[in-house]
Image (cartoon, grey):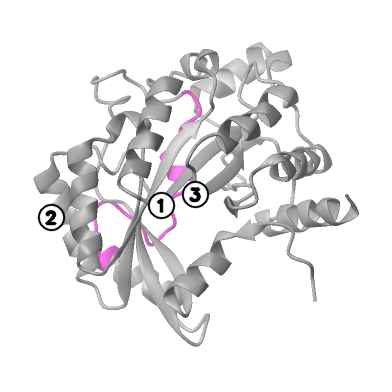
Amino acid sequence: MEKVRYNHLNSYLKDKFGSRTLKVCIDGGFTCPNRDGQVGRGGCTFCLCESFNPDYCRKHSTISAQLQAGKEFFQGKYAEMQYLAYFQAYSSTYAPVEILRERYEEALSVEDVVGIVVATRPDCITDEILCLFDEIRDRGFSVALELGCESLYNRTLKRVNRGHTVEQTYDAINLCHKHDIPLTVHLMFGLPGESEADILAEADMLNALPVTNVKIHQLQILRGTRISLEWEREPSAFIHFTLESYAQLVANFVGRLRTDIHIERYASSAPSEMLIAPRFGVKPSVVEARIKNLMARK
C-alpha cells in the first residue's frame, strides 16, 4: 500500500460524507469588483474565466440546470455519489445577501446536493455573508469557502492588478475561522517578480494562519490576457517552469506545510489552444504523480 505523505481533500470528503462526493461547477451569474469598477476594471492581468469553466457550466443556464447537467456528466463514475454545488466563476459572494440566499438555495434544492462550495475574493467576505453560511449549515448542509489569495505579497498583487491586499486576505481568513467555516486558500506559483524562495516562504506564512485546505496552481500564460503581453515584453520577470522544476517546487512547498492542511490540487489545466506557457504536455494527474514520486524519494 502506498504510504500517505500528505492529507488529500478527496479522502477528507469521503470520510465526512460517507461516500464519494464530487464538486459540480456552477456559474452563478456573479461578477467581480475588479471588473465592474468597484475596485478596478479589466480584472486580474492573468484572468480568462473561459479557460476553466467546463462545458456544462454556462451562465445562460439556470443553477439547477447546470447542476443536473453536471450530475449527468459524472453519472456512473462511482457506485454512490453525492454532490457539492461549486460556485466557481468570478466572485460568488459579490452580491447582496438576499441574492446570495436565493442562488445558494436553488443549488441546495437539487437532489443529492449535500452542500455548497463558494469561490470568492478576500475583499468580498463580510460577517453578514458568513452568518448566511451559518444558517445554511445549521440546516444540515455542508458549507465551505475557497479564497482566491493567489499571492501573499502586496507587490505581486499590485503588479497583477488583483485589487485587494494581503491584509484583507488575513482579515478574511480570520473572519472565516471565527465562524468555523472550512477554508481553501488558492495560491498561484510563478507570478511575475516572485522567486522560488518567495513561494516557499508562503508555506511558512500559511502555517501561521487558521487555514484548512490549499489549492495550488501554476500561473498559466493565456492568449488574450494582459499578462501574456508582459510575458513577451519582460520574460526575465517570470519563472520558466518545466514539468520537473515545477514538481520539485511543489514537493518542497508541501513538505513545509503543517501536516493538518489538506491539499486539494497541485496544478491547473487550460485548453491547449489558449495556453502559451508553461506547456507541460501532460494532464494534472501526471503532475501530481511526479510530485508524489519526488516526495517518496525524499
Per the picture, the main secondary structure of the magenta-coloured stretch is loop
How far separated are the C-alphas under marks 1 and 3? 6 Å
- The residue indicated by pointer 3 is 212
| Sequence-first tag of 1 and 3 | 1
Question: Which residue shows up at 53% across the image and 66% down it?
Answer: 12
Pick whichever, 286 or 168, lies toward us: 168
List x then y, in percent, for residue 157.
48, 19
Q: CA distance from mark 1 to mark 2?
A: 22 Å
Relative to the observer, which residue lies in front, 60 or 187?
A: 187
Type of amino acid under label 1: Pro
Q: Nearer the viewer, mark 1 or mark 2?
A: 1
Circle 1: is it few (<14), some (14-19), or many (20+) Cα within 10 Å?
some
Residue 138 to residue 148: above or below: below
**Cα–Cα gap, marks 2 and 3:** 27 Å
x, y (%) of residue 170?
A: 42, 28
2 or 3: mark nearer the eye: 3
Whether residue 290 appears in magenta in the rendering, the answer is: no
- Confirm or deny contact between disc 1 and disc 3 (CB under 8 A): yes
Judge left or right: residue 185 versus residue 127. Answer: right
The stretch of residues the image draws in magenta is 45-66
Q: Is residue 5 left or right of residue 273?
A: right
Name the amino acid type tagged 3: Thr
Q: Which residue does the numbered mark 2 point to in the structure image? A: 102
Residue underneath mark 1: 182
The magenta stretch spans residue 58:
yes
Q: Crowding at label 2, few (<14), some or many (≥20) Cα neighbours within 10 Å?
A: few
Residue lying at the far left in this picture: please name it. Answer: 98
Residue at x 32%, y 59% (from the top left corner): 116
